[in-house]
């Protein structure tokens, strides 16, 4: 079957969803094509790619509504041109709001079935949609709608009961092993002999870095050798640095900004605990949390905020702990439980490796999707 991956963002752009789409496309049986937005480095990437990729401008320099109109028009034109040269027999929509309406249109006019992949946040936004009947029709007419966590499947069963929904295990590719150890001292601080908490994510409110910093303030009463490394950039950076100073843990919290894959791999291998205390901020939710799987792949116990789809990535009491994302004391207690128990650390590390290598793989994700679509 000829398949069109009709998406918004796609490799070489970096990101969890982009990585998922790239991995699925590379494993998809039969011929396929890709329509995606342009991004830095795409020319070299696309020349080496085994399928044709049509890129369209993002129009991000235009005001929001105007950019949306131009982008959707460009996607439609690309869809028409691809249809003329490559009579695709199925569309895989990478993004509901961006690609779903045009796939719905193509299904109505040409009968081409389409699959909608979802990740969580875009579904929550449907609660406030001004056109709920339209979105229900898009979901209902889809051949399959996939989710990555049970809360989102539950939401869809209420929003549009007639949609065919399937929860598919999220795939993850762990970063390559570090070629060398983390340099010592690291960013002006010695980490030798210290207990290291690692956190990775965009510095936005829903990631809960403020709760983690407050938890560090509780933990330093018990552990005077503690260091917390926060990796990422974002609009909350100044506020978080101010909070660390106010809590008296400025010397214990290291903000790295953006780093390369090698440095990130070094940090994963140096960490004693990985913590990301995600919480829901309105419709802004954590769909899954691939970083928990990446940490688990290195044998690092994890602590995650019990919100959104995090419970799919963090099995409470097995590979790590789920915590109240609004309670720094709960976070501190769970981190302390790991830091103070070598046997627990070993058990959780082993379970994290099992989840990463046996459950949350892209081969498993692709296989589950093929089974749901009855593709043999």
Image (cartoon, grey):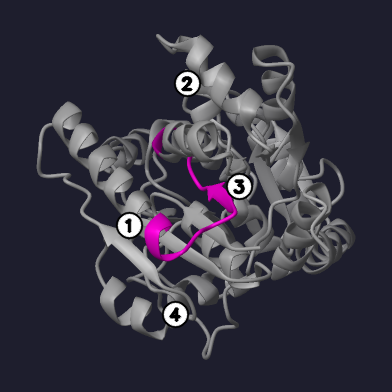
Give the quadrant of the N terminus.
bottom right
Q: Compared to 201, does 212 lie above or below?
A: above
* Residue 359, image quadrant: bottom right
Classify 187 as above or below 368: below
- Segment tinted magenta in the rendering: 83-98
- Tell whether label 4 touches label 3 (CB within 8 Å): no
Residue bearing the label numbered 1: 81
From the top left corner, tell me how far across and down residue 36 is, in percent. Answer: 36, 56
Image label count: 4
Asked whether residue 227 appears in the rendered view, the answer is no
Element under disc 2: helix
Q: Nearer the viewer, residue 204 or 229?
A: 204
Residue at 28% x, 35% y: name it.
Answer: 239
Question: Mark 2 or 4 closer to N-term?
Answer: 4
Q: Quadrant of residue 82?
A: bottom left
Left of 291 or right of it: where is 210?
A: left
**Counting other residues with Cα less than 10 Å from the Cα at mark 4, is it few (<14), some (14-19), or many (20 or more)?**
few
Distance, label 1 to label 2, CA atoms, is: 31 Å
| Residue of label 4 | 49
Numbered label attached to residue 289: 3
Crowding near pointer 2: few (<14 within 10 Å), some, many (20+)? Answer: few
The x and y percentages for residue 259 are 36, 68
Callout 3 environment at 10 Å: few (<14), some (14 to 19), or many (20+)? many
Assess whether residue 86 is covered by the magenta stretch: yes
Outermost residue toward the bottom in this view: 179
């Amino acid at each position: 079957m000829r398949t069109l991956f009709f998406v918004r963002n796609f490799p070489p752009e970096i990101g969890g969803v982009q990585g998922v789409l790239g991995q699925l496309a590379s494993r998809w049986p039969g011929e396929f094509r890709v329509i995606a937005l342009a991004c830095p480095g795409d020319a070299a990437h696309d020349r080496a790619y085994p399928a044709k990729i049509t890129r369209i401008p993002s129009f991000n320099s235009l005001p929001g509504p105007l950019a949306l109109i131009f982008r959707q028009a460009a996607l439609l034109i690309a869809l028409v041109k691809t249809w003329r040269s490559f009579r695709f027999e199925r569309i895989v929509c990478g993004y509901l709001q961006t690609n779903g309406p045009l796939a719905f249109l193509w299904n109505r006019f040409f009968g081409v079935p389409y699959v909608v992949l979802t990740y969580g946040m875009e579904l929550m936004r449907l609660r406030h949609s001004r056109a709920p009947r339209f979105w229900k029709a898009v979901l209902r007419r889809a051949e399959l709608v996939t989710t990555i966590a049970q809360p989102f499947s539950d939401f869809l069963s209420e929003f549009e009961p007639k949609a065919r929904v399937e929860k598919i295990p999220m795939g993850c590719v762990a970063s390559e092993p570090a070629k060398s150890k983390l340099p010592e001292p690291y960013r002006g601080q010695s980490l030798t002999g210290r207990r290291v908490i690692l956190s990775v994510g965009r510095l936005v409110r829903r990631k809960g870095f403020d709760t983690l910093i407050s938890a560090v303030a509780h933990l330093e009463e018990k552990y005077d050798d503690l260091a917390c490394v926060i990796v990422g950039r974002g609009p909350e950076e100044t506020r978080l640095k101010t909070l660390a100073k106010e809590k008296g843990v400025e010397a214990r919290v290291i903000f790295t900004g953006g780093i390369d894959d090698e440095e990130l791999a070094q940090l994963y291998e140096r960490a004693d605990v990985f913590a990301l205390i995600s919480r829901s901020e309105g419709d802004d939710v954590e769909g899954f949390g691939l970083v928990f799987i990446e940490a688990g792949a290195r044998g690092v116990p994890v602590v995650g905020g019990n919100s959104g789809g995090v419970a799919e990535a963090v099995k409470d009491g097995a590979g790590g702990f789920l915590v109240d994302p609004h309670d720094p004391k709960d976070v501190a207690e769970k981190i302390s439980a790991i830091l103070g128990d070598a046997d627990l650390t070993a058990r959780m590390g082993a379970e994290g490796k099992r989840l990463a290598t046996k459950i949350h793989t892209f081969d498993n994700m692709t296989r589950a999707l093929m089974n749901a679509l009855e593709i043999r």
